[in-house]
Image: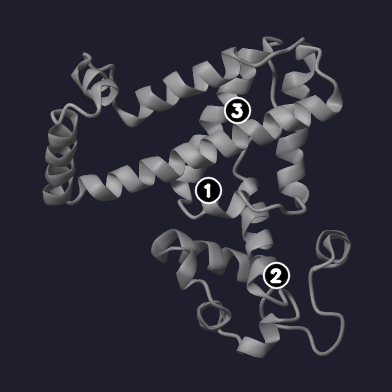
Amino acid sequence: MDPRQLWLAHGGPRRGRRPAFSREAITAAAVALADAEGIDAVTMRRVAAEVGAGVMSLYSYAPDKETLLDLMIDHVAGELPASGPLTGDWRADLKTIGHRQRAHMLRHPWLPAAVQDPRAPGPRTLAFLEHALAALRPSGLDGAARLEVFAQLTSFVAAQVAFEVGQARVARDPGRAAAEALYLAEVAADGDHPELAEALATAGRPATPDAVFDRFLTRLVDGLDAG
């Protein structure tokens, strides 16, 4: 859908009697469905049932599921702080933004996959982007480079959250987790994978999701070239 029509035009149908629901209500229903059952559960039929509308009437607001997904992403982006004081330490501020993105995506586990596809950002997403670019201004990077850094950060957070969600799913199945551990132990002992054997034998660092994310985020942000 043309992003100008989606984000700059009025959000309701242009003709006919006034509906008993709104684009905001449709989007909120789709988000609640995705949060509870995953993005595959979001269909026009299910969303229509949630708001008590006919399926065909939804197409006046979102002509396809991809457009609905655009609306959903921007809807939940309103949860992210788009203003507030910045420290002037761009690396510290960028880490704060990364932690906020992680918490946001963990609340909405369908987001990591959704944000990886190229999309025209809506107004709430743009407000958060503006805040992030302002946080990066003291880095001395030009505008294009700051956009690249923000995209890199978002992709990293999305990938890490997707991994965390997958790991949590495995942890809920002790049999699978134990089988995978035994498998890796046998592979490491076969003599053909000395690097893996050394890595597995090394005293582990804290492996909680919070600690792992913080460690990876620090490596990413501290390694950025601001020259």
Closer mark to the observer between disc 2 and disc 1: 1
Residue type at the position of mark 2: Arg
Report, in whole angstroms, how far the alpha carbon at label 2 lies from the one at label 1: 23 Å
Q: Earlier in the sequence, mark 1 or mark 3?
A: 3
Measured along the vertical axis of the image, is residue 111 above or below residue 59? above
The three-letter amino acid code for the residue at tag 1 is: Pro
> Who comes first in sequence, dot 2 or dot 1?
2
67 lies above or below 195: below
Q: Position of residue 179 (x, y in %)?
A: 13, 46
Residue hosting label 3: 97
From the image, tell me which residue sits under label 2: 23
**Mark 2–mark 1 CB contact (< 8 Å):** no
Residue 70 bears which disc, if any? none
**Residue at the spot 28% in from the left edge and 16% down from the top edge:** 205
Residue beneath the point at 70% across and 70% down: 23
Name the quadrant containing residue 191.
top left
Residue under the image location 68 percent in, 75 percent down? 64
Q: Secondary structure at mark 1?
A: helix
- Most extreme residue toward the front is 192
Residue at image mark 1: 112
Q: Quadrant of the N terminus?
A: bottom right
What residue lies at 50% left-to-right and 41% top-to-bottom?
A: 159
Q: How many marks are shown on the rendered structure?
A: 3
Judge by depth and name the residue closer to the eye, 133 or 170: 170
Horizontal arrangement in the rendering, residue 109 relative to residue 151 (left or right): left
